[in-house]
């Protein structure tokens, strides 16, 4: 019996070929094992269990057609083939569409049902699939997915590789690298599941489940690969559906189901690999020789028993002699000034992936991963944006220029006003507050006042601005570390609330109030919550400071009410995390109230809401929040909600014009614009929806993702206002680009630069 | 004995369930009557502030995870090391290091506050003489009791949470992990267990394949069941 085994890479992220060979040698001492590899740099070719090595040229240069014919000859001659390489399995399924009795790999149809991320075959199993979307979605929607999943997301390649993206800048960077490495944009984003990793490995032949084991990881490498594990039988509640799934898939070969078990004991399926796992010999050590079971099932030849030596295994590093006929290749020269030798994927897997992609194996089907077509037109932009923008007379607009989207802004402020009225009760009043620093534009401040907002200020200059804009003193909230800046603007009348940023600030406030310098209806503190890095508020993560805080609250004047202020940018920490944080703050407040003996009358919460998160289901979320506040803090009379950028960001856009288009053959297009990062300083923090107007036709369209980079006018290396956008083929200098979603910190933090 | 002075005495084995076998006693005999660790309260604001702080900290650290998640943050905040008993809430939260009894008592507090059914538990774990010698030296250097060490065996504490219909998991707060019910011989394994439940009721729990009777020391071995079940 001659068995060909591929996938011999044996680095820190090994393939299973060596483990398969070790297991088969134990079960079939007389079998002739042939190691198949595509690089003499894969150390597995030197493993002593192989009787011979069939070394092929790397995948990127291999003649696939003739290689397929050679494999066919081997199979016809009675050789058995176990592939331990995902890409090879995919390719073999296309070479042998009707299968072959000696080819121990699954069919194309079976593979399509276990392909990531949907893994449609999973429906029979008692497992969930972590939520995911494809990279086909617009950047706007991908950013939303990341926020909804608290930025605990993985960007995954079509076959291998998953990289964590903790913020938008990281996501963009990782996407460029993965797309380039795997020669495809067919990537997907999947939420992270916290828990313990475990796997099931199995052998099957023509739809019959021959054997299976469960493995719980007990030690991991730096990239979460198994280093030690515990083997046990697959529990009945999984085994029966697994058997059914294998039957329906008509599966042949090895497989591995990679899963995570969360703290509530729910299993989440991450992927089904169409081959054995690299730890497969660990199962043999525990008495479950799966590769032997496969050979026995396929040939009927009885395997020798593999005695169980325990139910745990671990790995060690071994040095083995190099085969004389395959001496070690020389190390490639490091690139000039470079670090390391660039030896990843020695068998040319990336090149192979590229060839499969070109042959249509990883087609870009323009779907979101759930069968819904992704549209990339003006329908993805709010109607009011289009109405506002198309009403502008751009002939008279000197670009770059911010555009005030009046209809959009009015709608947002009015809606916020209605929402607060709707959720207020006789016991508790919900009041909006507009943070002047988000965008001090007078038109927005006016809208806030008209919609019944209070105003949040961070300096006495801002207090003065609010008073001049028509706010009464008792409609103003003062907070932040710079609240005493420009004392000459201290108002004579009492403010609505003052929140202290530190214990020292609190003592200063008390002193100021005692001499009548500053008056406020509510005096309170801002909390710096544990686990979320912030420079603001009073930290409460040590018992010592917490006690100091409790002691300090007692010195606040009894004539005024007491309040707590908690602000954290929801767009940065994630939507669900923000709500969990909110609830934990209520717990802290409840403790503070009980320990200090001061009743909390006002709770000021916010901010940094991404517009869509604040608008989509804010009614339900805020109604729940009000109920929670009443549950934890029954004496609260007013909740001040500061929506942050949720209202300001959509209210302005930035118009710019194309100055020059530089086309590089076979590479990205560089489009120079008259805008810059000086007008769009938040370019790296979140995506902006971009509209394009052809100056000749006057037609508007929305820009999707593509290969162009929009370079700012500044002579600064990092002045790239957008990357990977699809600029129309007929675009010309003078055409207009409008960056939406620029009304918050893009506007307020924009600066004059390079203007002479 | 400083430990005995402050810890709750609980000797239900003899009173309720009778003697365990002689062989088992070799494993846990030294700690037959050893009380479980309890954190004391001065009955004043100092301890109340500390306890409130601790529980609020857990709500922050949990960050939306399952209430059944092990509170790993406790061990991250407090190293494992000798603790001078008796210890109060206002003292325990300010320590740099805490022994297994204090860490387990804090974890127990966390689970109870989260609303999880949870019990304190005593364990005997096996290590090696070399390991226990090292620990004994360290504990003696800080003038704390080494009663918890007996040759290659050590007394240890953890907490048991009920996850489903009498099925428990054991959280080892000072190692930040769930104890593996399949390992009961060799270095680092659990050899005996006594779980404290209400003394008025006889509670039976399932831990992996083991049947555990509350308030009774029992040796853990393959398919171990308590004397009362046998």
Image: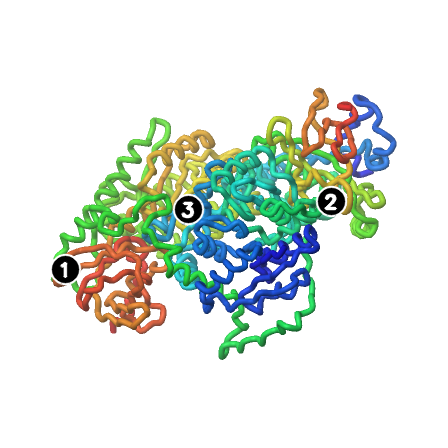
Disc 1 from disc 2: Cα separation: 74 Å
Q: Chain of mark 2?
A: B
Percent x, y for residue A1?
63, 55
Observer-nearest residue: A586 or A123? A123
User: Count the marks: how many?
Assistant: 3
Which residue is the site of mark 2?
B83
User: Is residue A405 positioned above or below A8 on the image?
Assistant: above
User: Is residue A717 positioned above or below A313 on the image?
Assistant: below
The answer to whether residue A387 shows anywhere in this view is yes
Numbered disc in front, either 3 or 2: 3
Q: Mark 3–mark 2 contact, CB under 8 Å?
A: no
Q: Secondary structure at mark 1?
A: helix
Q: Chain of mark 1?
A: A
Quick check: A394 left or right of A755?
left
Disc 3 from disc 2: Cα separation: 48 Å
Which residue is the site of mark 3?
A132
Which residue is the site of mark 1?
A394
Same chain check for tags 1 and 2: no
């Amino acid at each position: 019996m001659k068995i060909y085994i591929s996938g011999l890479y044996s680095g820190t992220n090994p393939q299973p070929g060596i483990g398969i060979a070790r297991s088969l040698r134990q079960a079939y001492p007389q079998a002739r094992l042939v190691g198949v590899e595509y690089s003499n740099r894969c150390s597995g070719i030197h493993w002593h269990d192989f009787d011979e090595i069939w070394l092929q040229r790397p995948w990127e240069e291999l003649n696939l057609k003739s290689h397929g014919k050679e494999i066919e000859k081997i199979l016809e001659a009675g050789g058995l083939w176990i592939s331990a390489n995902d890409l090879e399995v995919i390719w073999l399924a296309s070479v042998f569409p009707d299968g072959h009795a000696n080819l121990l790999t699954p069919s194309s149809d079976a593979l399509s049902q276990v392909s990531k991320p949907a893994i449609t075959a999973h429906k029979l199993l008692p497992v969930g699939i972590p939520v995911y979307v494809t990279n086909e979605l617009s950047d706007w929607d991908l950013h939303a997915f990341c926020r909804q999943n608290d930025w605990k997301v993985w960007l995954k390649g079509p076959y291998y590789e998953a990289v964590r993206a903790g913020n938008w800048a990281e996501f963009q960077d990782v996407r460029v690298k993965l797309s380039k490495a795997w020669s495809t944009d067919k990537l997907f984003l999947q939420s992270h599941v916290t828990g313990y990793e475990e796997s099931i490995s199995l052998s099957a032949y023509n739809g019959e489940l021959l054997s299976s084991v469960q493995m719980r990881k007990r030690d991991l490498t730096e990239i979460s690969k198994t280093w030690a594990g515990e083997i046990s039988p697959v529990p009945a509640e999984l085994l029966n559906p697994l058997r059914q799934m294998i039957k329906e898939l008509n599966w042949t070969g090895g497989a591995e189901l990679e899963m995570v078990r969360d703290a509530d004991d729910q299993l989440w399926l991450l992927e089904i690999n169409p081959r054995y796992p690299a730890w497969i010999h660990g199962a043999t050590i525990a008495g479950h020789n799966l590769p032997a079971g496969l050979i026995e099932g396929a040939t009927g030849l009885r395997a020798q028993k593999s005695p169980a030596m325990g139910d745990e295994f671990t790995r060690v590093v071994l040095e083995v002699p190099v085969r004389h006929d395959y001496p070690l290749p020389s190390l490639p020269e490091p690139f000039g000034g470079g670090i390391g030798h660039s030896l990843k994927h020695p068998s040319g897997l990336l090149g192979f992936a590229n060839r499969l992609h070109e042959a249509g194996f990883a087609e870009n089907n323009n779907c979101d991963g759930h069968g819904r077509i992704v549209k990339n037109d003006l329908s993805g932009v709010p109607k009011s944006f289009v109405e506002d923008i198309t009403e502008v007379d751009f002939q008279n607009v000197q670009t770059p220029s911010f555009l005030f989207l009046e209809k959009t802004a009015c709608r947002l402020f009015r809606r916020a006003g209605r929402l607060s009225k709707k959720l207020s009760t006789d016991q508790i009043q919900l009041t909006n507050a507009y943070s002047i620093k988000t965008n001090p534009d007078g038109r927005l401040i006016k809208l806030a006042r008209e919609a019944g907002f209070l105003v949040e200020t961070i300096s006495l200059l801002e207090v003065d601005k609010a008073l001049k804009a028509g706010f009464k003193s008792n409609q103003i909230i003062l907070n932040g570390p710079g609240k005493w800046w420009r004392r000459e603007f201290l108002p004579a009348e009492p403010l609505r609330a003052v929140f202290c940023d530190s214990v020292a600030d609190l003592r200063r406030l008390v002193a100021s109030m005692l001499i009548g310098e500053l008056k406020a209806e509510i005096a309170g503190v801002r909390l710096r919550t544990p686990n979320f890095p912030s420079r603001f508020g009073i930290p409460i993560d040590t018992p010592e400071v917490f006690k100091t805080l409790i002691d300090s609250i007692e010195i606040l004047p009894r004539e005024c009410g007491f309040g707590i202020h908690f602000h954290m940018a929801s767009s940065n920490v994630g939507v669900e995390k923000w709500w969990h944080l909110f609830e934990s703050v209520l717990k802290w407040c409840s403790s503070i109230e009980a320990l200090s003996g001061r009743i909390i009358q006002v709770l000021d919460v916010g901010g940094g809401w991404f517009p869509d998160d604040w608008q989509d289901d804010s009614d339900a979320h805020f109604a729940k929040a009000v109920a929670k506040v009443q549950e934890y803090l029954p004496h609260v009379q007013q909740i001040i909600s500061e929506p942050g950028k949720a209202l300001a960001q959509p209210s302005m856009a930035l118009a710019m014009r194309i100055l020059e288009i530089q086309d590089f053959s076979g590479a990205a297009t560089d489009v120079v614009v008259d805008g810059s990062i000086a007008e769009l300083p938040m370019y790296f923090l979140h995506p902006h929806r971009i509209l394009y107007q052809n100056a000749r036709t006057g037609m508007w369209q929305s820009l999707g993702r593509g290969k162009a980079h929009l370079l700012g006018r500044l002579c600064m290396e990092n002045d790239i206002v957008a990357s990977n956008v699809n600029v129309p083929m007929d675009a010309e200098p003078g055409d207009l680009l409008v960056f939406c979603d620029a009304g918050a910190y893009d506007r307020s933090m924009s600066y004059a630069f390079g203007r002479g | 004995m400083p430990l005995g002075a402050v810890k709750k005495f609980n000797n239900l084995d003899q009173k309720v369930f009778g003697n365990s076998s002689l062989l088992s006693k070799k494993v846990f005999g030294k700690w037959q009557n050893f009380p479980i660790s309890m954190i004391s309260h001065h009955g004043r604001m100092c301890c109340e502030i500390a306890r409130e702080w601790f529980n609020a900290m857990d709500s922050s650290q949990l960050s939306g995870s399952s209430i059944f998640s092990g509170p790993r943050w406790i061990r991250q905040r407090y190293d494992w090391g000798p603790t001078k008993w008796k210890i109060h809430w206002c003292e325990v939260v300010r320590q740099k290091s805490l022994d297994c009894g204090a860490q387990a008592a804090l974890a127990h507090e966390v689970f109870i506050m989260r609303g999880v059914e949870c019990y304190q538990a005593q364990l005997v774990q096996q290590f090696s003489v070399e390991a226990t010698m090292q620990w004994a030296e360290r504990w003696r250097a800080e003038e704390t009791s080494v009663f918890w060490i007996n040759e290659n065996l050590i007394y240890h504490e953890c907490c048991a949470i009920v996850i489903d219909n009498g099925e428990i998991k054991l959280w080892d707060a000072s190692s930040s992990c769930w104890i593996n019910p399949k390992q009961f011989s060799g270095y680092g394994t659990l050899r005996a267990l006594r779980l404290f439940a209400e003394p008025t009721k006889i509670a039976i729990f399932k831990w992996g394949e083991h049947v555990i009777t509350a308030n009774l020391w029992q040796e853990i071995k393959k398919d171990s069941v308590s004397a009362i079940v046998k």
